[in-house]
Image (cartoon, coloured by chain):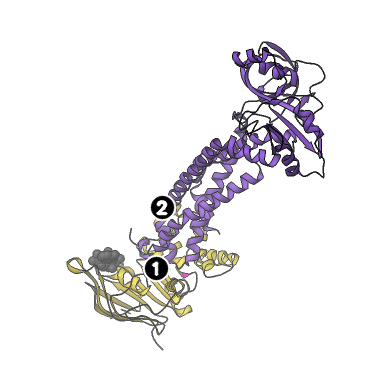
Amino acid sequence: MNLALADIRHNLGRFLMTGVGLGLLMAVALSMVGIYQGVVAEALALSRSLRADLWVVEEGTRGPFAESSRIPGDVRAMVARLPGVADAGAITLSTTEMQAPQGIIRVQVMGYEPGRPGGPAAIASGRALGGVRREMVADARAGLRLGAVVTIGGDRYRVVGTTRGLVASGGDPLVFVHLRDAQELQFKLAPAAARRAVAAGGAAGSIDTVNAVIARLSPDADPDGVAGTARRWKHLSALTDAEQSALLTRSVVNRARVQLGMFTVVLLFVSAVIIALIIYTMTMDKLREIATLKLIGAPDRTIVGLVLQQALLLGGAGFAAATALVFAARDVFPRTVALGVAEVSAMAGVIGLICILGSLVSIRAALRIEPAQALGG
Amino acid sequence: MAPLVQLEAVSKVFGTGETAVRALTEVDLAVEAGEVVGLKGPSGSGKSTLLNVVACILEPSSGRLLLDGQVVWDGRYRIGDLRRLRRERIGFIFQFHNLLPFLDATENVALPMTLAGTDPGAARARARELLDYLQIGRRASAMPSRLSGGEAQRVAIARALANRPRVILADEPTAALDSERARVVMDLLRQVARDQQAAVLVVTHDEKIFDRFDRMVALRDGRVEQVEARAA
Ligand SMILES: Nc1ncnc2c1ncn2[C@@H]1O[C@H](COP(=O)(O)OP(=O)(O)OP(=O)(O)O)[C@@H](O)[C@H]1O
Ligand SMILES: [Mg+2]
C-alpha cells in the first residue's frame, strides 16, 4: 500500500480541487511560455518561408524588418550576377490598413515578383500569385476566403491563395501582392513631399524602389563571402540569413520577448510559492498522522516519501489539467501559442523541480515532528 | 535472565523552573519475559508518561532504562535508531487509538509489518488473522472513521501485535470495551506474553480485569506507591 496515494484517495475531492486550482495557475504560466515561443516563431516565420540566404539592404541600415531600407529596384539584377548567387528577388514591405469584407484590418503588405525569391514557400489553399496584377495571397490570420475582394489604397485585389503562420513581428497577418502593385501602393502611401520630388523627375524619378533584395545561393557558396562582396558596393549593405534571424529575435521582437520572458519567470515564481504553501498546508494537516507513523517506527524515508510523492502527484495533476486547458484553448488566443513537445516537457521539468524544492520546507518540518505529538486527545 | 523491561530510578520532569512538573520520580520497575503487569493510579499520576518513557517516545530526565538487558538510556540514548527499536521490538497500544485515517483496518494493521520489510501479501494475511482473532474480521476493510471506539481500539491492538514485539505497552486498552470484550483482549495479551515470551505492561483503571495481571503496580504523584502480587 502506498501511503501518499491512500491519503489522496481518502481526501480525493480536496486533492482534485487543489489540482484544478493549481492547474489554472500553471495554465497561465504554460500559455505564457507558448506565447513567448510564438512571438519568436512568428518573428522567424517569414524569413524561414522566404528561404533567403542573403539580404541586400540600404547602406547603414539593418533592414528591412529592424530598420527601414530603400534601394533602387535594379539592385536585384546586380545581386543576381554575383558569383555564388543562384537566384535573387526584390521585395517591398509596408504596413497598411486593408478594407476586407469583415471590416478594416491591419496587414503587412509584401510585394515580390512571382517566379523570383520573395514569395511564401508553401500555399495552404488556392494558388500562388500568377501573371495577373491585383491578385493577393493572404495569410489565414487575415480571415479571408478564397475569391474575396479587398481594397488597399483604393485598389481592389482578389484573394487567390492563403498561407499559414506568416505574420509580421507585431502579429499583423502578411499579404503578398505583385511587386509592381506594392510599389504603386508605397508611392501612394508616401508623404506628399516625397511624392512631388519623385514626380519632379530625375534619375531616381521612377517608382522602382524596393526595400530589400533577397538572394538564394548555390549550395557550395559561402554566405559570409558573398555578403562581404555585396557590402563593398556603394550605398548597399548585406546581411546573411543567420544575421537576419539574430536581428529578428534580438532586436525586432526583443522587448516583447523579454517582457514575456520576465512575466513567465514571475508567474513561475508565484506558482512556486503557492505550490510550496499548498504542500506545507497538506503536510501540516497530517501532523498527527506523521507523528503516528513515527510512533509505530516508520523511518524518515517513509515520511519524506509521503511528502515528496504527494507534492509530485499534486504538481502532476495540476500540470495535466494545465496542459489540457491550454491545448483546448490555444486557438482562442489572437497570436500563436507555440507549444511543442520540447516546451511542454521543459515546463514539466520545471514544475517537477518546483515541487521538489517546494517540498523541502515541508520535509524539514515533517522530520521535526515529535512522535509524542500523536499522543493526547 | 535479565528482565525485558527495566527502569532504574527513572525520573521525568516536564518544563523547567517554577512551572516544572515532576511526572515521574525515581521509578524502579522490572517486567520479566512472559509477565503481564498492570499499572494503576489516579489521573495525572504519571502512568502514560511511564509507558512513553519505556517506548522511547519521551526522554527521561534521569535514571536508566534497559530493554532486554541492553542499556537504552542512561543520560542519553545509547541506541541510534529509536524508530527501528520501536518498529521491531515494541508494540504500543495508545490511550487514543491513533489509527491512520486514510488506511482501512487491515492496512493499518499491516503497516508496521511492511515498514519492517514483510512482504505486503504476507502482511495482509497476518493482519486479517489478527483482526479475526480480535473478533472484528468483518470490519477488516472499514476505514477508521467508520469504526466504533471499541472496534478502533481492537484494530489498534492488532496493529501493536503485528510484528510480534517482545515488549507490549498498552495505555487503557480496554477503556472503550464492554467487560466481555475487555476480558478477550486481556486473555489475548496474556496469551501473547506466554507464547512470544513478551513483557506486557498495561495501564488500566478497570477493576474488573485486575485479576488478569501477574502484578499490579500503583503510581501516585509519579512514585511507585505499592506493588501487589496477583490476587489469586
Ligand atoms: N507533555 C507534557 N508537558 C507537561 N506536562 C505533562 C506532559 N505530559 C504529561 N504532563 C504532566 O505529567 C503528569 C503525568 O501525566 P500522565 O499523562 O502521565 O498521567 P496519567 O497517569 O496517564 O493520567 P490519565 O490517567 O489521566 O491518563 C501530569 O501532571 C501531566 O499534567
Ligand atoms: Mg494517561
Locate residue A224: give its quadrant.
top right
* Identity, as a three-letter code, of the amino acid under mark 1: Arg
In three-dimensional space, the C-alpha distance between marks 1 and 2, rounded to whole angstroms, equals: 37 Å
Foreground: A26 or B127? A26
In the rendering, what colour is chain B? yellow
Locate residue B215: give its quadrant.
bottom left
Which quadrant would the C terminus of chain A be assigned to in this image? bottom left
Q: Is residue A32 magenta?
A: no
Above or below A99: residue B129: below
Q: Residue at x 74, y 27 (%)?
A: A90
Foreground: B70 or B134? B70
Residues in magenta?
B161-166
Q: Does the image show residue A359?
A: yes
Residue ID for mark 1: B183
Whether residue B129 sits left or right of residue B227 in the image: it is right
The chain to which mark 2 is attached is A
Residue ID for mark 2: A285
Give how far across and how far down residue B211 sits, in percent: 34, 74
In the rendering, what colour is chain A? purple
The chain to which mark 1 is attached is B
Q: Secondary structure at mark 1?
A: helix
Whether residue A287 sits left or right of residue A30 in the image: it is left
Same chain under badges 1 and 2? The reply is no
